[in-house]
Image (cartoon, helix red, strand yellow):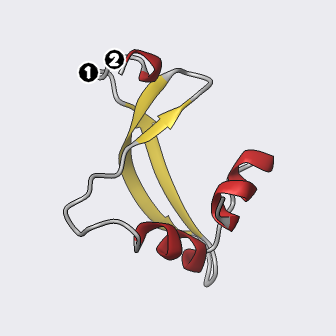
Amino acid sequence: MSTAIRKASAGPAIITVGELIDELCRLPDTAFVTFHCPMLEHELAFYHLRKRSKDIVEIEVKAYPQSRPAHAA
């Protein structure tokens, strides 16, 4: 299991850009990335990217209302 996945399962998912790149670089350029929330049991849609400081970027997601619950997929 990668470092990014271990960190995400141990608590709040806080990963570095490098860890995210390591995870994503294993995928082909045509791969789709989806987000879901286990607590909501719903898919999430990318909403907004905001630079909070020199070293912190916030990626906002929101519940994707047209999606079915993630466990039903």
10 sits to left or right of 59 = right
x, y percent for residue 29: 23, 69
Frontmost of labels 2 and 1 is 2
x, y percent for residue 65: 32, 22
- In the rendered structure, which amino acid carries the disc numbered 1? Gln
Q: Which residue is mark 2?
A: 68
Residue at 49 percent across and 57 percent down: it is 59
Compared with residue 39, is residue 16 higher up or lower down, i.e. above or below? below
Considering every residue shown, the one lying at the far front of the view is 1
Q: Callout 2: few (<14), some (14-19), or many (20+) C-alpha neighbours within 10 Å?
A: few
Which of the 4 quarters of the picture holds residue 56? Answer: bottom right
67 sits to left or right of 15 = left
Q: Which residue is mark 1?
A: 66
x, y percent for residue 47: 37, 48
x, y percent for residue 73: 35, 22
Residue at 34 percent across and 29 percent down: it is 64
Quadrant in which the N terminus appears: bottom right
> Is residue 23 visible from the viewing direction of this image?
yes
> Which structural element holds mark 1?
loop
